[in-house]
Image: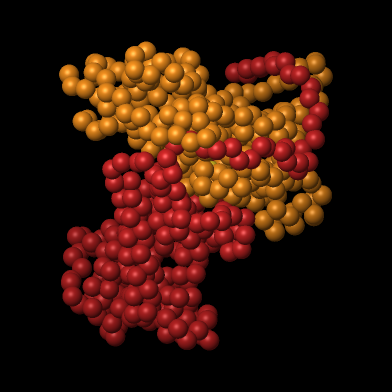
Amino acid sequence: MSDITVRIWRGDENGGEFKEYVVPAQEGEVVLDVVHRVQAGQAPDLAVRWNCKAGKCGSCSAEINGRPRLMCMTRMNSLPEGEPVTITPMKTFPIIRDLVTDVSFNFEKLKEVPALKPKPREKDGTYRMMQQDIERGQEFRKCIECFLCQDVCHVIRDHEENKENYAGPRLFIRYADLEMHPLDTNDRRKLLQEKAGLGMCNITKCCTEVCPEHIHITDNAIIPLKERVVDDRYDPIAWLGRKIFKRSSKTQASA
Amino acid sequence: MTRYGVILVTLTDSNPKPVSTPVSLGGARGGPKVKTLRKGAWWLPQLASGVGLALFVAYASWTAIRNGHYYVGIMPSHYYVGSGRDYLSPFYSPCLTNSCVNTSNHVFNWWKLSPAFLILIFPGGFRATCYYYRKAYYRSFWFSPPACAVTEPHKKYSGETKFPLILNNIHRYFWYFAVVFAGILTYDAVLAFRFSGGIGVGLGTLIFVVNAVLIWLYTLSCHACRHLCGGHTNTFSKAPVRYWFWKKISVINPHHMLFAWLSLVWIGFTDFYVYLVAMGTIHDPKFF
Ligand code: SF4
Ligand code: SF4
Ligand code: FES
Ligand code: FES
């Protein structure tokens, strides 16, 4: 087999550049294997974050040939042969070193999400939920927190200033999970529209395209949340109904 | 069968008031300062859908301005090429103005423009506020973003939070009208079985039936429909009817983009077919 050329971004907050490494190709490798071989040989100081090598820990997120992907789940033979492979750190988050970025933005945003506030317990002291009540949320809990969706989202990727009032797709699935929860009594719709920036998302679906867990972020979380916000504030008939029947918008939303 | 799940939860009282947690902004980003490192024709899908949408808008405008040859009359004496068919172009249905050739049911007599303009507001508004078409035009015409992981050319970005884009939130109202329109186009498809000598099936009949089916698939796979018919519910086990609807709509909803394109192309084709038959350019074959 021939050689492979990888161009890896080397640098920190003070700047950086591409460094080219040539390693012999090996059968059945993923990008992370190649990065590890570079690290084991030519560049022992190369910083790269990884953990499971099985697409489950969400640590090895980077941009391969310009596309946000997991390094451990990108097979070398899926990339154009004979061309150098570029590997850069996620663009949306501040760089620490080389391929490692500071993703604490996402955890700060997670702290803002109001937790589950359950209904009173039933008479026997328990809660009951049926499978059909919770199955929507199960899709969202497949998330491995790789933050590739946050990285690709143009709202913050191209506009740093939006970070203050924008939660991003990974957090939108968290909001959706809680908002659709059969036991929850919190109403996060005002927060979603005003501070979490749901209206900033223009449903262009890049988050869905990059999600390694194939979560339908836009169709199953963001759009349903947008529709719930419409119930709350943009639907005059729903508003009138609430006035007439004196129901809160939340009780109307839950069954 | 009843299944119970007993869960243990920590009781957390929380206060979902709008507060923003300070997030340390800034911090130098890594990677080269280029628009994108993507390879290959990442611009192609956006270009293709942009061209497709532009062609359709051009065609629809021509059709609406044409203000003629939109009906193939059922009566042989009809002043249009009366080939004994009852085909009304979907761009002119329902025809409600003074100038309509297919009906004496003139509701909007004051309307002086082509009757198409009066009704195209509704399907036009439905498609313009559709979640799929929004994605398509934001990407193809507004370049926000031009493609995933390709820098957009705008300095500022406010998404759908300001006028006019905030109006996209009224999509569900257009959906209510769209259901009415799907009903009307279904009625037109039924009328397409009428021939001057009785009931029959022509090539046009089949085209009208396919048109109605595609319009229904597009309308029912709509995201607002999915929400209104059940998605707003949190406890599906207590709302079996809504759950049933939601389940069914969730089967076709993932194909909404496909139905958006198929129904768009087909409605244009249906109109063009009626135009050609009304012009006498082609003769509509009758199968039985
Ligand atoms: S669909 Fe919305 S959240 Fe997802 S990447 Fe696009 S703008 Fe961001
Ligand atoms: S939603 Fe998908 S892309 Fe986003 S963090 Fe979770 S697993 Fe990663
Ligand atoms: S190393 Fe765990 S997801 Fe790649
Ligand atoms: S018609 Fe496309 S989402 Fe409603």
Residue lying at 33% horizontally and 59% vertically, measured from the top left: B52
Question: Which residue is pictured at 36% across the width and 58% down the height?
Answer: B50
Asked if residue B232 shows in the view, the reply is no
What residue appears at the point 76 percent right and 19 percent down from the top-left corner?
B10
Q: Is A220 left or right of B281, judged from the image as shown?
A: right
x and y, in percent, of residue A57 in the image:
50, 19
The quadrant of the image that shows the C terminus of chain B is bottom left
Q: Quadrant of the N terminus of chain B?
A: top right
Q: Residue at x 51, y 47 (%)?
A: A158
In this rendering, the answer to whether B82 lies above or below B93 is below
Numbered disc total: 0
Residue B283: % across, % down: 18, 71
Chain A shade: orange
Q: Is residue B145 left or right of residue B282?
A: right
Give the left or right position of residue B183, taking residue B56 as reference.
Answer: right
Q: Quadrant of residue A38?
A: top left
Residue A201 place in picture, x, y as percent: 56, 47
- Relative vertical location of residue A110 with respect to residue A228 in this rendering, above or below: above
Please tell me which residue lies in front, B134 or A242.
B134
Q: Could you tell me residue B257's position as x and y percent? A: 40, 48
Chain displayed in red: B
Q: Identify the image's colour scheme: rainbow, by chain, secondary structure or one colour.
A: by chain
Q: Nearer the viewer, residue B136 or B187?
A: B136
- Residue closer to the observer: B32 or B210: B32
Residue A92 at least partly seen: yes
